[in-house]
Amino acid sequence: MVDKVRDLKEVVSEIPAEGAEIALGGFAITRCPIAFACELIRQNKREMSLYEIIGSMDADMLVGAGAVKSLSYGGGSLDRFGRLGRINEAIENGTIDVKEYSGLGLTLRFTAGSMGIPFIPTKAMLGTEIIQNLLKAEPAVKVGQSPFDGESYVFLGALQPEYSVIHCQYADKKGNVVTEGPVWDLDLAKAGRKLIVTVEKIVSTEYIKRFPEKVIIPGVYTYAVVEAPYGAYPTSVYKCYDYDARALKLYAGVNTNQHDFDEYLSKYVLGTKDHNEFIEQMGGIARLNSITADPVFGYAMGGKNDGSD
């Protein structure tokens, strides 16, 4: 049996110190690979080209830490808690190269990459300001006429990033990945030349054999599996834990300016040796208990999780 289980620090250390091309999964405040992003910052990775369909705290932290050279994304936020302040300021100041897509537009580039085809046609973004901006700066985006129906289409070049990174509930040692609830990372994951999956728990292959219908990514796609409990914290993981409103509200308060963000980074990321210490700094087991998901409904029930405590 091929054992693809790796340690987080070890697998991040494989990534080039400068110039890596990385696609991050997740959606706003759900299943974002926060532990992975924080380890990239601890290991001082620089000049990265980052892709994220819906931007979140992980990409915002990497931009704020000065680790990103270019970012391609389809918008994003901290949901009701706030904006991606470090990304927004970087765009306004022109300190990173940003290419803004629609969420569907960037997803389709991953779809082409996962299928092994050179490009994919779409009507998405056609006639919008988004496509006009992309045509000026993105060689992988073109508009042309279909040879079949004569209509105009957007042709999106396939995207196969060097690394794709997603966070899910479970995987076995072979890299067969199980995700409970909504699924949106499939094409991004399968397009990566090396797929790294961080999971809440590594389960036995016997579990996979009992529930094969739950496997969304077969092990053949997976390069490495990392067991990272609460690896998406403070964003949520369906049926495991809810988002931590207090932690997200704290971040939304500091990411509005670089000074406060740097203090946050120094205390919670650079000042901690790993994701366990990060969580301890955020409140430890008491916070985790307060956001534990109800096994039936999949999110925290009955508690106060509005960030006011």
Image (cartoon, rainbow, N blue to C red):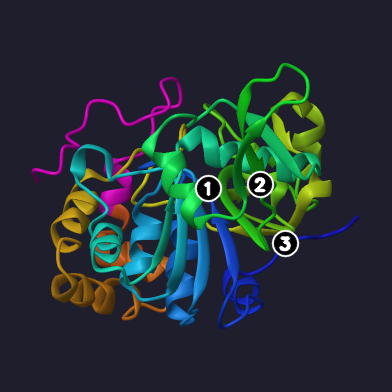
Q: Is residue 157 left or right of residue 102?
A: right
Q: Which residue is mark 3?
A: 5
Q: Which residue is mark 1?
A: 25
Which residue is the extreme one toward the right? 1
Q: Is residue 281 above or below residue 116?
A: below
Q: Is residue 104 left or right of residue 1?
A: left
Which one is in front, 70 or 224? 70
Q: Position of residue 307 (x, y in %)?
A: 14, 44
Q: Which residue is mark 2?
A: 189
Circle 3: element type: loop
Q: Is residue 19 above or below residue 233?
A: below
Q: Is residue 303 magenta?
A: yes
- Of labels 3 and 2, the one closer to you: 2
**Magenta extent:** 286-309
* Residue type of the residue flagged with mark 3: Val
Are circles 2 and 1 on residues that touch, CB within 8 Å? yes
Task: Answer whether residue 203 is visible to the viewer in this image.
Answer: no
N-terminal of the pair, mark 3 or mark 2, is: 3
* Residue type of the residue flagged with mark 2: Ala
Q: Is residue 36 left or right of residue 226?
A: left
